[in-house]
Image: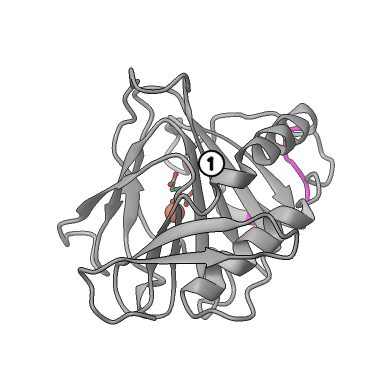
Amino acid sequence: MNDENNSAYNLDLFPVDSTPRETTVFPLSDHSVILKSFASTAASKIYTSTAAISAQAPFRHWQTPGGKQMSALSTNCGELGWVSDRQGYRYQATDPQTGKPWPSLPQFLSELAHDAAAQAGYNDFVPDSCLLNKYLPKASMGLHQDRDERDFSQPIVSISLGLPAQFLWGGLKRSDRPQRLLLEHGDVVVWGAADRLRYHGIAPVKASKGTTADHRLNLTLRKAS
Ligand SMILES: O=C(O)CCC(=O)C(=O)O
Ligand SMILES: [Fe+2]
């Protein structure tokens, strides 16, 4: 990957389904990138899948271990889903709300995440979990680390659709001042290796006149097991 942090480069990529994927790569570090528009051509398929997933496993607000309600709405697909309640944060194979296994992770999403990870130098990424986060205007996500997965050598792939948002990209300490990075419809962030445990979050999402979207949808794909 490019080691000049301020330059972007353009790539035309042909994934397995042979839909061209055009992207501009913005390196965040030697281990992490923003792939602008990488998921744009898959957006309508992702929205259709999200509707099917949330029909089986509805979006809900997680409770934090401290008893607060998270402002984003969440659900999961894949073998394991990330959940939070008074007992803590964890992955589990069933939806606590329905007792049923999470809906399966669509193959095209797994491939999209695999291909995005490869752009950042992670060649063998196969996710087994996808957390879907839906942000209505004013919803946000506080600075946190993703540390409930088993294997921190596996990266995180995060897809943004709909309303834009400011991604807070912090350091390895909570007190490190985060950079604010604009994530727009179709953008994919990949981070891992030395950045795997960076604090990150989402500033309160704002309604936007420039789009018909009324919410932001984030899909975070990880290998949890
Ligand atoms: O919505 C986002 O872009 C970030 C979501 C996130 O960090 C998480 O679910 O762990
Ligand atoms: Fe996270």
Between residues 187 and 56, which one lies in front from this camera angle? Answer: 187
Q: Quadrant of the N terminus?
A: bottom left
The residue positioned 59% from the left and 56% from the top of the image is 90
Q: Amino acid at mark 1?
A: Arg
In this picture, residue 78 sits left or right of residue 149: right
Based on the picture, tell me whether residue 189 belongs to the magenta stretch. no
Pick the residue in front: 222 or 6.
6
Q: Quadrant of residue 222?
A: bottom right
Q: In x, y percent, where is residue 116?
A: 55, 65
In this rendering, would 99 be left or right of 25? right
Residue 177 in view, yes or no: yes
Q: Is residue 101 above or below residue 203?
A: below
Identify the residue at image location x=61%, y=62%.
113
> Percent position (x, y) of residue 97?
73, 33
Q: Position of residue 225 (x, y in %)?
A: 68, 70
| Disc 1 crowd, CA 10 A, few/some/many (<14, 14-19, 20+) | few
Query: Predominant secondary structure in magenta?
Result: loop
Q: Nearer the viewer, residue 30 or 62?
A: 30
Residue at coordinates 84% horizontally, 41% vertically from top-left? Answer: 100
Please state the extent of the stretch shown in magenta in the rendering. Answer: 91-97
Above-or-below relation of 198 to 166: below
SS for dot 1? loop
* Residue pointed to by mark 1: 86
Q: Is residue 96 magenta?
A: yes
